[in-house]
Amino acid sequence: MATLVEQIGKDPVRPQVIADCVDLIDAQVKQKGFMIKSAYAMIKGIKKKFIPEVVDTLLDDWLGKIQPHYDKWAATSISPPASSFSDYVIARSDDVAEDLLSVTDARAEKTSHTTAKKMYGRMRAGAKKDVIEAMPELSKMIERHLAAIPKSAAQ
């Protein structure tokens, strides 16, 4: 079976996945407080394409972190599955959030963008809660993209 990176992390699907991730981030930020909104606006103001570029850079690693969860879900699912992948991920959102944040933690540690690194450091403590809150939409987005792939291409 093809990996998530192979299925939705490659062209022609990848650009839409990136755009959907950016839209998800934008929607999540709109629900946050002044500090997060301000930091996000500042980052976007410094470099307009910064968020899409970061998502593009991290997408394969994020999908790689989701892959074990997807594999466990697929292995325990019977035809038809007892639950959706989204339900499975949401039930394990604490672990999935930590896995996803391990990618951004490593990236923040290595980045040369000092402003972004400082902002990330200030907001990291609350980031897990934010990722958990986004988990339903994120998992549904993954499901949507996977469902759009012809079955022969997913093999």
Image: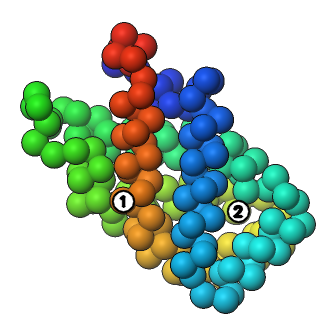
Residue in front for this viewpoint, 137 or 94: 137
Q: Which residue is mark 1?
A: 136
Residue in front for this viewpoint, 66 or 48: 48
Q: Amino acid at mark 1?
A: Pro
Q: Secondary structure at mark 1?
A: helix
Q: Quadrant of the N terminus?
A: top left
The image quadrant that residue 10 belongs to is top right
Please tell me which residue is depicted at 87% across the width and 68% down the height of the picture.
45
- 24 lies above or below 121: above
- 134 lies above or below 70: below
Residue 47 percent coordinates (x, y): 88, 60
Give the label, 1 or 2, closer to the camera: 1
Residue 86's disc is none
Which coloring applies here?
A: rainbow
Determine whether label 1 and label 2 are within 8 Å by CB.
no
How many angstroms separate mark 1 from mark 2 (CA)? 28 Å
Q: Secondary structure at mark 2?
A: helix
Please tell me which residue is depicted at 77% across the width and 74% down the height of the picture.
41
Q: How many labels, in total?
A: 2
The numbered mark, 1 or 2, whose residue comes first in the sequence reads: 2
Residue 79 percent coordinates (x, y): 10, 28
Residue 114 percent coordinates (x, y): 84, 69
Q: Is residue 54 visible?
A: yes
The image quadrant that residue 16 belongs to is top right
Please tell me which residue is depicted at 63% across the width and 65% down the height of the picture.
26
Q: Amino acid at mark 2?
A: Glu
Taking 116 as reference, is 18 left or right? left
Q: Which residue is mark 2?
A: 109
Residue in front for this viewpoint, 102 or 20: 20
Residue 42 percent coordinates (x, y): 82, 75
- 55 lies above or below 71: below
